[in-house]
Each structure stands twice: as structure tokens, then as C-alpha cells.
Amino acid sequence: MIVVSNRLPVTVSVKDGEVVVKESVGGLATAMKTFLAATDGGKALGFDEVVWVGWSGLADEPPEVAERLRGQGLEPVPLTKKDVELYYEGFSNSTLWPLFHGFTTYTVYRDEFWDAYVSVNKKFAEAVASRAGPEDYIWVHDYHLMLLPLFLRGAVPDAGIGFFLHIPFPPPEILQLLPTSWRNEILDALLASDLVGFHTSDYMSNFIRSAVKFVGASAEIDVLKSRHGYAKVGVFPIGIDFDRFYNSSLDPEVAKEMEEVRRLLRGLKIVFSIDRLDYTKGVINRVYAWERFLKSHPEWRRKTSFVLVVVPSRTGVQQYDAMKRQIDMEVGRINGELGELDWVPIIYLYRFLPTPTLLAMYNVADVALITPLKDGMNLVSKEYVASRRDCRGVLILSETAGAAKELTEAIIVNPNDIDGVAKALEKALAMSEEEQCRRLQEMQRKLRSQDVVKWGLDFVQSLISARMERADREAKLSIVTPLEGPALEQMAAAFKAAKSRALFLDYDGTLMPLYPYAYQAVPDDELLRLLEALAKAPGVHVAIVTGRPRDFLETWLRDLPVYVVAEHGLWIRRPDGSWTAAITVDSSWKPKVRKIMEEFVERVKGSYIEEKEASIAWHYRNVDPNVGEAAAAELTDSLTALLTGSGLTILRGKKVVEVKPAGVNKGAAVSRLVEEIKPDFVLAAGDDETDETMFAVLPADAYTIKVGKGKSLAKYYLPNYRAVREVLRRLLAA
Ligand code: GDG
């Protein structure tokens, strides 16, 4: 397995010509190290070796650094000063970081940034490729490397490629601000992965909506189909090393620190927060909320202090320096205004805390005030909760942190609601010990079971199965052979030899040409005579398997003794003319969907709605293709937002977007008929996506035929409906 992240999990320095390598602390490095240690360096998962590829942190590093790192399972990607400036500080931290966190006005768009991002992602791909083979798994981390899956797919096409995003994925309306080609290249590159993972389902659905809207991917629950094939998407909320924090107070060094902190703070109630200096963290909002609290609750003055730790980060970047000055100024003002000779309202530290001190603070703080404006996950909140073996302490957490989805027993606040945060502070400081413990226990239960090892295992196991599914699909997709010559003769012979034969035939595009309007595709005499002759032949069962509504089929096929599967498997008609429904039909959702589709009919000239008993379809066959595809993507997007969790699915067929109940498809209906008819010869033919569900469920010896161009699960290929009719005539002759 190859792990790739912008930074290697070490801090490297060169002192007096000697290379010094230290382990680094912080989110990703610690998380992966814990995961790897728990899996015996990946061996428990079947990996012989784990190599980590990334930047050492030194620009223009001397060659001895690489040598030294390689000896430790690390593969450095050397970056120049210019790379660091344009790719790291530039595109990663001045474009993607603000935009993905929703800080659109801080986002800088510069061509040199983008160019460097592309070229550094290529450098990473080369470094990975130098170590990777076709059997390997590559796990790429975070927003610095979003183009990497595409470059890797080119360099090591058969490797398993997984990508995990540690920060939020923004909604399409925000992503849209990125210049079109950058935005689309990023989405397209991510889709070259086998698996793309996010912290929350919101981020995942933002990604799905963007991929559908901007690069025309089609979504099937947790799979996105694009020009690269299939990419799985999933939610993997990162956890922490629970036991390490839960046991921290037992560590003598931490215990000593705890005592020291308690002694220095003399019985004051402590409200604690620690953050990297970053505008996403909303530090100033906390300061204002604290001021509001102290002003509206003077009785708490001298009884409590706010320990505000801000860790230096990205110094030298303009926005960060301005923010630092504002914090310095406001903290000074409040301390000056409200402080006393023997009491400081805000104890402000601008530095990195040694780990034992941080753990001591987690263990003694009465309240943790963690109110970022936007945060992918936020590990500090989890670490605080896990540390409280004594079952004391209250967490105040922003609803805009990914962690709020799991830590629902925290006091959840809106970080911009200064009054709300001030009230939460009062509630937290007054909370009974029983309630503190009840809330903590519930959160600890979740953190214990969803720890960082579980996160890693879930991701890697999903990656392994996603890759297997892809290999499986590609193997099947690649063997479509023309149905002619000996292949056709062999099939005709099998048809003749069989006792019971089932023919599952799609209608539009398979037996008939595609017409601009659905109502125009009225069966011609030649087709009707052919179907009738087949259906009346002994031991032959003909089924027309289509997305069309019952009434159309009743009108035109009524007199034929054939099976009919209508509306993609919702209705089945037996040759005796009786109809049965596959599920009970609830149509209460239809008006809402119709209303949205009507807007599109209004806007997109030439498009129209076809309403069926259990589904509604929007057709755009006779619309300018560019306009039609863009509108279809937009419609799918609006419908996805409306229908998530509704038990309905959105189907994108050829020039049609259709909404219908989930679990109903041609494949399910055809399986039913196979059980009923028990044929010893099965043929299925179809031309679009919806027919793939038939090919997927039929027995291995079935003759499955893809009509027209494109990849398919079918075994054989025929160019058009005329060829299909020709083959049917050949069978009839047999
Ligand atoms: C990304 C996402 C997501 C911090 N200050 C000190 C210190 N730390 C440690 C904490 C914690 C980590 O650093 C920071 O955790 P974050 O959750 O903020 O993670 P990041 O790595 O900044 O960022 C974030 C995360 O990835 C994981 O996916 O949660 O949303 O932005 O572990 O304890 N440690 C010590 N002294 C400090 O002063 N010793």
C-alpha cells in the first residue's frame, strides 16, 4: 500500500550538515500512524509493505534528505521554493482552502497557481509510480492532491486508487466559482479513483451533485459513472485514538501537568479552546461571545477564565497576519476593560502546546468552546470528550463542524450567533454533574466504536471491494463480440435444441429505430408479423421489456400473445392479456416532480414530459444536444436534492431523465419471468443503460446482446434494430 499526502508524517531539518528527522503531530499524520500501528504496519490487511509518499517540508532539500527518508519507508517528493509558493501556499492554501470552506471572498484565482498545482501533482504521480505496481493500493489524501487519481490511472492503470478529502467539499454553487476548466479537471480527476471518501454525507452529496452537474457523471446511489468507468463514493468520518486520550490522565507526566494547571488557576472554572490560527476557526467570534457572556452575567466574573490557545500557522500570509492583530487587539481590550488586579478574563497563549500540556488542559477544562465557522471534521472536540475519564466537562460545538454530526450530545451552537454562544456558555457552566456525565458517556460510546482504526479499516476495505467490482465490470465490459458468422450459427443451433426458449427484447432502439417523439414509434407490420410468428412457435416465449407505459403497449401490442414488461419492470402482462403490478403504486410524489419538469419543458424548447402510471419522464431527444445535456444535468441535480431518501430513483437513459420507485428495474422483472418460464435458452437484447440491469441478472449461458455502440455487460453486439430483426428471423428459421 502506498499512502500519499502533501506532507510526510515527519518534520525534517538540517543542522550543521546533519539531517534531523522528527515525527510530526497533527490530524492526518497521527491518524494514519495509529491506523498503521494497529494493523501491524498494514500486514493484517494483507499488505507486505507500506510506503508513504510526500513532501519533506523543506524547499530545495539537499539530496541526503531523500537518502535518509528512503531508509524509513518514506519516499520524498522534492519541491522547489517556487513550487511551495505557487502550489502549496498558492493553489492549495489560497484557492482551494478558502473556497472549499466557503470563504469565497478570500479565494485567489491565479493562473500560475493552477499551473503549479498541475505540475506538482504530476511530480507526485511520478514519485508514486516509481514505487507502485499493478497489484498495489494507493491511498491519496486531501485537497493538495486532487488531480493525482487521474495521473495515477494513467501511470498505473490497474492499481486500486482511493482518495480521501479531509476538508469539506463545497456545494456546486460555490465550486462553480472556480474557473470552468480547473473545476471540471478536478472533478474529472477525482472520478478516476476507485473510491472517493468524505467525512460527512453532506460533503459527499455536494460532490455527487457537482460531478453530475459539471462533468455529466451519472449517479447510482453510491457509484458515479464517468468516462473513467465507475467510482464509488462513501462517508468515512475520521475518529481518534480513543484509548490514548481516555487513559491520558493516568500518565504521570500529564497528571503532574494537571496539578500544575489547577494550582495556577486556583479553583477558577476553565473554559478552553485551542486552534490553529485560521479564519475558518472563528477565533474572534469566541472572544466576542465570551465578552457578551461576562457582560450579561457579572456574577461569573472572577469565577471563570477563558484559556484561549492559538497555534501559529501560515505566518506571512496577509489574511492570517491581519487576523492575528485583531485577536491581539480585542483580547487586550476585553482584559483591560473587565479584568481585575487578581483576575484576567482571557488567558491568551499564542504558541504550540507540548502534548502533555494539551492533554492536561483537556483533562481539567470545565468547558471546551470549539466553535469553528467551518471545519471538515474537527478532532480537538473529539479529543476533549475522549479525555474525560472523570465524566466531567461540557463541550460547546459549532453546527458547522463535521464532528457535530456525531457529537450530538454537545451543546450545538451557530458560531456567528454571539448571543446563542453566550447563552451556551452559561448553560455549560451551570450544568449539573449528572447531565455532564450522561452527555459525555453517550459521546464516548460513539468515539470508542468509531475510532481512527475503524476509519482506516472501513476506508481500505471499501477500496479493496471497489477495485474488485471495477475489475469485474471491466472484465465483463470488454468481451462484447459481434453476433455474426459462427457465433450466430451456434446460437441458432442452441435455440433449435432447446425445449423452452425465452426472448427478452427491449423496444425503442432495439426492435424499432429511435424517433424524435416517443408516440411516433408505432410498430410496423414487419415487426408485428415477426413477433407474432415467434410467439406462436412452440416453446418460444417472447417478452417485450420496455420503459414505455401500459397504455401505449396495450394499444399497439394487444393482439400479440407475448409477455410485456412495462415502465421498466413496474408492470408485467402475461400472454393471456392479464396485467400485474410489481409493487403497489404510490403516486403522491408525482405532482412535485411534475412541477419541476414542467419548468424545464418551459425553458428547453422541444423537450416534453411523458407521464406513466408510476413514473414520470422528461425527454429531450429533439433538443440541441449541448442544451439538452446541460439541462438534463441540472434537472437531475434538482431532483436529487428533492428526492434523497424518498425511495425513488432518478434514471438517466438515452435523452431522457426519469423518476420512478427504487428497486423496480428491468432486471428484477426479467428474473421473475425466468423463474416462471424456466427456459433452457435465454436471449436478451437492449440498447441503453436500463437494459444493463437485465444483462446483469441473467444466467451465465444467456445470449445477451448490446445494440449500438458503447460498453456493456452483454456478450454480443449488434449494430442496430435491423440487425436485431435479422437475428430474430434466423432463429425463427431454426
Ligand atoms: C484537517 C481538517 C479534520 C493542535 N494544536 C496542538 C496540537 N494539535 C493537534 C490536535 C489535533 C490536531 O492537531 C488538529 O486537528 P484538526 O481536526 O483541526 O485537524 P487538521 O489536521 O488541522 O485538519 C479537519 C482533520 O484534517 C482530520 O481529517 O478534522 O477538519 O481541517 O489532533 O490535538 N497538538 C499539540 N499541541 C498543539 O498546540 N500537541
Image (cartoon, rainbow, N blue to C red):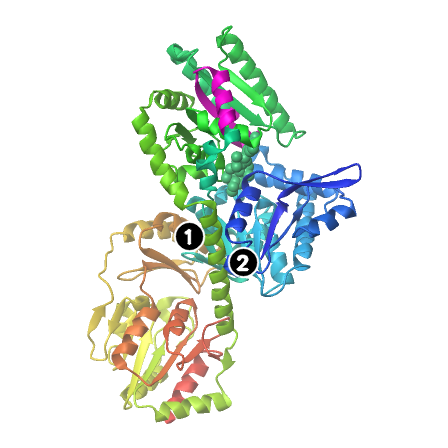
Residue 509 or residue 30, whichever sits in front = 30
Mark 2 surroundings within 10 Å by alpha-carbon count, few (fewer than 14), some (14 through 19), many (20 or more): some
The CA span between labels 2 and 1 is 47 Å
x and y, in percent, of residue 279 in the image: 55, 30
Residue 265 located within the stretch drawn in magenta: yes
Q: Secondary structure at mark 1?
A: helix
Q: Identify the residue shown where x is 42% and y is 52%.
A: 635
Q: In this rendering, would 155 be left or right of 275?
A: right
x and y, in percent, of residue 71 in the image: 69, 52
Q: Earlier in the sequence, mark 2 or mark 1?
A: 2
Q: Nearer the viewer, mark 2 or mark 1?
A: 2
Q: Please say if 709 is above or below 422.
A: below
Can you tell which quarter of the image residue 604 is in? bottom left
Q: Can you identify the residue that label 2 sits on? A: 43
Query: Residue furthest toward the front?
Result: 252
From the image, which quarter does the C terminus lie in? bottom left
Residue 578 located within the stretch drawn in magenta: no
Q: Which residues are magenta?
A: 255-283
Residue 630 or residue 134, whichever sits in front = 134
Q: Please say if 611 is above or below 184.
A: below
Q: Can you identify the residue that label 1 sits on? A: 635
Q: Secondary structure at mark 2?
A: helix
Please state which amino acid type lies under the numbered disc 2: Lys
Can you tell which quarter of the image residue 542 is in? bottom left
x and y, in percent, of residue 17 in the image: 80, 39
Q: In this rendering, would 602 be left or right of 533?
A: right
